Image: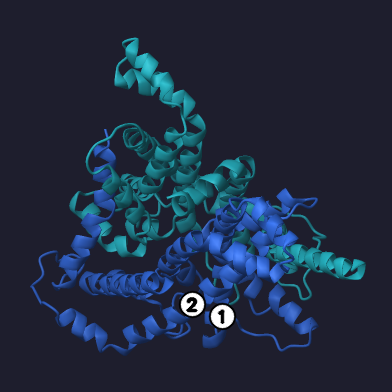
Chain colours: A blue, B cyan
């Protein structure tokens, strides 16, 4: 009975990974499925390719910034949502609504808001700043993608942390209150240790997701201006489907997997 | 002490209001903008409360861009994906929840692992797979990709949902001479409807919102899905915002309605993959 699902899982994970690995050792272009074996040549030329190295550098900045801010915000706001106050369920819904919005719609909304004469520049101007061409300037393009990604991916982390907070028994806090623990102490000694498992799982899920996220950066900047926001996910698409070199795309995918694997192993080692 | 309490409450209130505005304002701005004439969209300062209400961006999108065709394509893909991935995940989930066999633990971990595989790493192998079975540039190819995409999560969700159904009901049915299939159809199916509904809604959202697979798999105009069709509307420097906002609103509204109705189920289901296992 489980066989059909097992078949689906295999087709979803083992086949693509194996095929990517095979492709990365061959030279296969779109329309020429039988390419010669080239061994590690592909990897060697990619690792000496400035564009590739730069893409891994910029995606690291992107992933770290989005993950860190997302967790700080989610911890604070989920703690608030866990309190009892009037309109609490309304607050929760407004926090998670963005999760459901299609990426394409989210990207268009933000393009419209970040536009040269959009509402965000309007606010900047009232507060006395110079308007910024958000998506056309390399520094600001990265910043824009970070802000929009935060907005879109924050809800998932919020939901998970809120679920974790709700599973912490109330009496722990009450006992601590009686013992005279301050709010910061309660947070550091009750909330954080109890959230540890959830936090580490969700951090890993998030890092994997954001590191490889193609849709949002592509829809906002297409990797531009220049190569400022050309993350590996975008390079995979550009090399494989616009430059027709499937093998190069597959090799970049394998590099992404490798980096994430190293990250996950380090993370588990350090968090023990 | 009272003063400190007051400050604390005001600070909380400010945080609640600002964060809600940050999260909701873009959605308001999208829907508001889609009903404004072009001249108001590029006006500086913008109208925060619209003063003109027009629908010609919508009539352009629906009549001139024939948007309903793409809506139909997207719905067809989403419902077919549900029709494939839900029965398969239900069978697998039932087996994981109820039977003991070697490798069960492995299958659960395997599903979890599959759940974390990023989409972009799969795009190239799937492209080649669909080319070789001649389903490239077809809605059926897209349906296969989406069904595979949804299965790991639906399997985990349904397995843990079925685990919460008391075993005794099935056991007495089996003693009364019902077959396993009868048990699934007569007992498990009706009892796990909330779980199935959650998995189906999740699958719908995943398929309706997907852009990356569609971008790689679909090339013909006639069979584009909604996100692809929106992506083709020009959005350059002096962008023509009206159609862009109207089409994005069309893509967003069904999702918002579904989300607001099923919010409770979706939110509790979403944490499954991350929190419970």
SS at mark 1? helix
Q: Which residue is mark 1?
A: A143
- Subunit ID for the residue under disc 2: A
Categorize mark 2 by other alpha carbons within 10 Å: few (<14), some (14-19), many (20+). Answer: some
Depth check: B29 or A40 in front? A40
Categorize mark 1 by other alpha carbons within 10 Å: few (<14), some (14-19), many (20+). Answer: some
* Vertical position of residue B150 compared to residue A112: above or below: above
Question: How far separated are the C-alphas under marks 1 and 2?
Answer: 13 Å
User: Is residue B37 in sight in this rendering?
Assistant: no
The nearer-to-camera label among 1 and 2 is: 2
- Subunit ID for the residue under disc 1: A
Label located before the other in sequence (1 or 2): 2
Q: Residue at x 40, y 67 (%)?
A: A208
Residue A105, quarter of picture: bottom right
Quadrant where the N terminus of chain A sits is: top left
Which residue ends up furthest to the top in the rendered image? B176
Depth check: B116 or A184 in front? A184
Residue B238 in the image, given as x and y percentages of width and height: 60, 76
Side of A57 where A87 appears, left or right: right
Side of B164 where A183 appears, left or right: right
Residue B228 in the image, given as x and y percentages of width and height: 45, 58
Depth check: B188 or A13 in front? B188
Residue B161 in the image, given as x and y percentages of width and height: 46, 36
Q: Which residue is mark 2?
A: A64
Which residue ends up furthest to the left in the rendered image? A36
Residue B22 in the image, given as x and y percentages of width and height: 70, 66
């Amino acid at each position: 009975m489980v066989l059909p699902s097992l078949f689906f899982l295999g087709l979803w994970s083992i086949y693509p990974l194996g095929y990517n690995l095979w492709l990365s050792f061959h030279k296969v272009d779109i329309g020429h499925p039988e390419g010669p074996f080239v061994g590690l040549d592909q990897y060697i030329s990619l690792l000496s390719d400035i564009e590739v190295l730069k893409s891994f550098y910029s995606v690291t900045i992107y992933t770290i910034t989005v993950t860190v801010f997302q967790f700080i915000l989610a911890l604070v706001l989920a703690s608030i949502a866990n309190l009892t106050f009037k309109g609490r369920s309304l607050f929760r819904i407004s926090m998670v609504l963005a999760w459901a919005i299609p990426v394409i719609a989210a990207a268009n909304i933000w393009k419209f808001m970040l536009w040269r004469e959009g509402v965000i520049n309007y606010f900047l101007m009232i507060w006395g700043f110079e308007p910024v061409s958000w998506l056309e300037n390399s520094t600001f393009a990265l910043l824009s993608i970070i802000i929009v990604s935060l907005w879109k991916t924050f809800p998932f982390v919020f939901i998970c942390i809120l679920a974790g907070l709700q599973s912490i028994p109330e009496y722990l806090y009450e006992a601590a209150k009686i013992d005279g623990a301050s709010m910061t102490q309660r947070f550091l000694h009750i909330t954080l240790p109890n959230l540890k498992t959830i936090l580490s799982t969700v951090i890993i899920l998030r890092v994997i997701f954001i590191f490889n996220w193609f849709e949002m950066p592509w829809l906002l900047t297409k990797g531009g201006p220049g190569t400022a926001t050309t993350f590996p996910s975008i390079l995979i698409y550009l090399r494989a489907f616009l430059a027709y070199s499937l093998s190069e795309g597959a090799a970049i995918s394998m590099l992404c997997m490798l980096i994430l694997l190293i990250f996950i192993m380090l993370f588990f080692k350090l968090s023990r | 002490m009272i003063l400190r309490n007051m400050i604390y409450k005001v600070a909380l209130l400010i945080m609640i209001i600002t964060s809600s505005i940050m999260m909701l304002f873009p959605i308001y701005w999208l829907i508001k903008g889609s009903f404004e004439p072009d001249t108001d969209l590029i006006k500086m300062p913008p109208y925060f409360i619209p003063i003109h209400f027009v629908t010609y961006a919508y009539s352009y999108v629906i009549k001139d861009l024939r948007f309903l065709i793409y809506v139909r394509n997207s719905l067809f893909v989403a419902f077919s994906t549900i029709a494939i991935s839900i029965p398969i995940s239900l069978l697998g989930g039932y087996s994981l929840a109820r039977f003991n066999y070697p490798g069960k633990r492995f299958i659960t971990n395997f599903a979890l692992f599959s759940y974390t595989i990023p989409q972009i790493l799969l795009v190239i192998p799937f492209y080649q797979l669909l080319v070789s079975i001649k389903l490239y540039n077809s809605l059926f190819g897209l349906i296969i990709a989406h069904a595979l995409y949804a299965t790991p999560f639906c399997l985990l969700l349904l397995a843990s949902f079925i685990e919460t159904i008391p075993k005794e009901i099935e056991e007495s049915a089996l003693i009364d001479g019902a077959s396993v299939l009868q048990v699934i159809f007569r007992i498990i199916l009706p009892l796990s409807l909330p779980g199935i509904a959650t998995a189906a809604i999740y699958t719908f959202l995943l398929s309706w919102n997907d852009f990356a697979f569609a971008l790689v798999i679909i090339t013909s105009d006639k069979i584009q899905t909604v996100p692809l069709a929106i992506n083709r509307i020009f959005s350059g420097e002096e962008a023509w915002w009206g159609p862009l906002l109207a089409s994005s609103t069309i893509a967003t509204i069904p999702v918002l309605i579904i989300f607001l109705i099923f919010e409770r189920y979706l939110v509790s289901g979403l944490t499954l993959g991350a929190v419970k296992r």
